[in-house]
Image: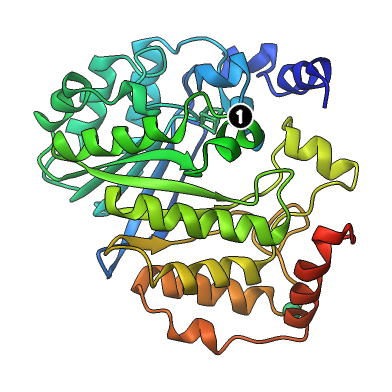
Amino acid sequence: MTESVARTIARDRRPSREADATADRYVNLWREAEAIGTTRVDAFVLILRTRGCYWADQKGCSMCGYAKDTLGRSATPEELGTQIDQALLRYRGEPYVKVYTSGSFLDDREVDPSSRRRLISAFEGRATRFLFESLPEFVTESTVGELRDVFHGDLEIALGLESTQPDVLLRLVHKNAPPKEYLDGADRVRQFGAHPKGYLLLKPPYLTEDEAIRDVLTSIRVASPKFDTLSVNPVHIQNGTVVEWLFRRGRYRPPWLWSVVEVLRDGSRDRHGARLVSFPTAGGLPRGPRNCGRCDRTVLAAIEAASLDQAWDALDELDCACRATWKTQRALEPLGADSS
Ligand code: SF4
Ligand SMILES: [Zn+2]
């Protein structure tokens, strides 16, 4: 792919000029099943509308189209205040709260420090766990400490490590920093009294299915001592991304759900006590991780149950005729066979 194609893709995913009209409305809000340890709980999930990830402007990761949901400029404290007030009206005391910004919650350009404190303090004494995402460079004693001062439940900070292999991370995922920055960031999260969660990407572009599985298994082995939770995120096709560009040209297939199953089964033996989870987005859909269409719902349900309960045995009992197809394609793909 040439630089000019990459620039065109990056331009396509920028927010529209009309984005300003939605500056005081959050992007989305929902409830979902989660677990704290192995206790199942309800989670309250909020996506705020912010300027979004600065790295998405500069280069952007090959699978990430979240810039579409952003303002393209910093939201003012007043706009964020309105979004927060509207969201709080719908909070029903769920113990687990997750707040996403399509970037880094700790980047002042996305959420100013007083809005951060205001939001998190609203859950003090009501939620037991508060999760947000950040690039590691923003995880400092001061940014985390100011939140610890106003929220005494568990703070969980998710870092998009994606892969512990430098080549995969920098050349294929296009992250802004090498894996060491993310591993060191996880150390700082712990040092500042919070829980590090790591995202691992299953099947960045240009890896075969088999290489992608081995990449995640290596990452689980290397990263698990540093993280309390590792979440395996199989790629789904987002608009305005390198992965979409390849997908449209028949050069990328989202990972099989069998690959997720294998990563969870094998990775669960090598995770140094870290929780290992996967909640595939767009599972079973054409642009998401999928099997043959007949077994997808059953396999997705088993992946979710295994993730919530940290119990892996039921994954061994899954089967479908397409499992043999997956195995054959895995073996033939390195020889140039079609994997669609
Ligand atoms: S994956 Fe994370 S770092 Fe990469 S562009 Fe998206 S929000 Fe930014
Ligand atoms: Zn099947």
Judge from the rendering whether residue 82 lies leftward or rightward of residue 219; answer left or right. Answer: left
The residue lying at 52 percent from left, 36 percent from top is 166
Name the side, left or right, on which 197 lies relative to 117. right
Question: Is 332 above or below relative to 123?
Answer: below
* Residue pictured at 39% horizontal, 52% vertical: 222
Going by the picture, which residue comes out furthest to the bottom? 317
Q: Which residue is mark 1?
A: 174
Above or below residue 329? Residue 127 is above
x then y, percent, for residue 76: 40, 9
- Residue at horizontal 61%, vertical 29%? 174
| Percent coordinates x, y for residue 146 in the rendering | 15, 23
Q: Amino acid at mark 1?
A: His
Quick check: is the Cβ at mark 1 less than 8 Å away from ligand 1? yes
As drawn, is 268 to the left or to the right of 196?
Answer: right
Image quarter where ligand 2 lies: bottom right
Pick the residue in front: 316 or 98. Answer: 316
Quadrant containing the N terminus in the rendered view: top right
Element carrying mark 1: loop
Disc 1 residue crowd, few under 14, some 14–19, many 20+, Cα 10 Å: some
Q: How is the image coloured?
A: rainbow
